[in-house]
């Protein structure tokens, strides 16, 4: 397959990918261990699990189901959305905000009725962000690492066979191989920092929604949705090639700071509040 003949694995691809995989595992583990050890009496493991389940159901089942019709399938709706950057960005940010934050709200208000401590709200956020890393992003990094290792051995045909890449699947597989070959320490740092931001955002948004639930103030769910939409705006624009990658990272840092600031203030307001 001629498309793969010019693929050259960079010298830093394998080590940077290996470190990225290790750090992807370490991020949720360290967050969990730190918070659990610090607040063992105020936290329950069930809240960590609930966060993971909440993310999977809202983002990976329900939201992806809508995406199939509105983005992936060929119909008038998908053609309109995919044909317009504005429509694509509005659709993507609204869907992410509504599904994930409403999913949080439903879980925190109707499912997790026991041990409603602010510490458990943070643990829920760790579960939500942690499963996103482990179940969604980590497999891609492991695949890139496997690709880099196989192609670095110099036998392209053997690498293609090991990866089960055929003439029919070559076009779909080529971007992954190119991404693995181009991966370096700069991309490693960017991916790790992005995941740290994402973990803080998931925790912050969970605290925001949780505060609305226990204070019975309806405005905090819309606030969380709007914050989520704002955070996702530049990543959606980047997907359309409208903004450079560096601007996405700056935007993420800005909104991480905003969301964490709001969450810290709400967290302090909940001191001593526990709903059984």
Image (tube, rainbow, N blue to C red):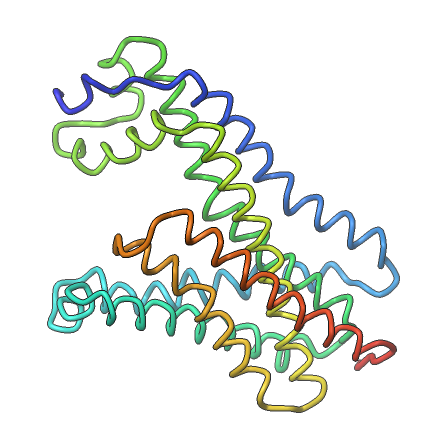
Question: Which image quadrant is residue 262 in?
Answer: bottom right
Residue 129 image position (x, y, % from top left) = 57, 56
- Outermost residue toward the top? 154
Measured from the top left, where is residue 266 in percent x and y?
72, 76
Q: Is residue 18 left or right of residue 203?
A: left
- Which image quarter holds the C terminus? bottom right
Q: Where on the picture, by quarter, is residue 128?
A: bottom right
* Left or right relative to 106: residue 90: left
Please tell me which residue is depicted at 58% across the width and 62% down the height of the picture: 202
Q: Which residue occupies the foreground of this view, 88 or 210?
A: 88
Which residue is pictured at 39% across the width and 68% down the height? Answer: 62
Place of residue 190 in the rendered image (x, y in percent of width and height, measured from the top left): 49, 41
Image-quadrant location for residue 117? bottom right
Q: Is residue 194 above or below residue 81?
A: above
Task: Relative to 225, say whether 28 is above or below.
Answer: above
- Residue found 23% across the figure and 69% down from its top: 70
Report how many numbered discs are placed on residues in the image: 0
Q: Is residue 226 above or below residue 253?
A: below
* Residue shown at the point (54%, 61%) measured from the top left: 254
Q: Quadrant of the N terminus?
A: top left
Left or right position of 157 against 207: left
């Amino acid at each position: 397959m001629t498309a793969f003949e010019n693929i050259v694995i960079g010298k830093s691809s394998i080590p940077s990918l290996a470190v990225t995989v290790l750090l992807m595992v370490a991020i949720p583990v360290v967050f969990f261990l730190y918070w659990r050890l610090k607040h063992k009496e105020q936290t329950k493991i069930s809240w960590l699990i609930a966060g993971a389940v909440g993310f999977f159901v809202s983002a990976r089942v329900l939201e992806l189901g809508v995406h199939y019709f509105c983005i992936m399938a060929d119909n008038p709706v998908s053609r309109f959305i995919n044909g317009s950057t504005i429509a694509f960005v509005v659709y993507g940010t609204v869907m992410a905000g509504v599904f994930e934050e409403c999913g949080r709200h439903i879980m925190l208000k109707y499912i997790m009725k026991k041990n409603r401590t602010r510490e458990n709200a943070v643990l829920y956020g760790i579960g939500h962000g942690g499963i996103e890393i482990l179940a969604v992003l980590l497999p891609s990094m492991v695949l890139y690492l496997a690709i880099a290792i196989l192609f670095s051995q110099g036998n392209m045909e053997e690498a293609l066979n090991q990866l089960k890449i055929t003439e029919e699947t070559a076009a779909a597989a080529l971007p992954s191989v190119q991404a693995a070959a181009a991966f370096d320490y700069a991309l490693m740092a960017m991916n790790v920092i992005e995941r740290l931001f994402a973990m803080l955002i998931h925790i912050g948004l969970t605290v925001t929604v949780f505060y609305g639930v226990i204070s019975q103030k309806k405005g905090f769910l819309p606030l969380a949705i709007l914050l989520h939409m704002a955070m996702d705006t530049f990543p959606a624009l980047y997907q359309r090639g409208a903004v450079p990658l560096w601007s996405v990272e700056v935007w993420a840092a800005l909104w991480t700071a905003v969301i964490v600031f709001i969450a810290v203030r709400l967290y302090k307001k909940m001191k001593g509040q526990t709903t059984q």
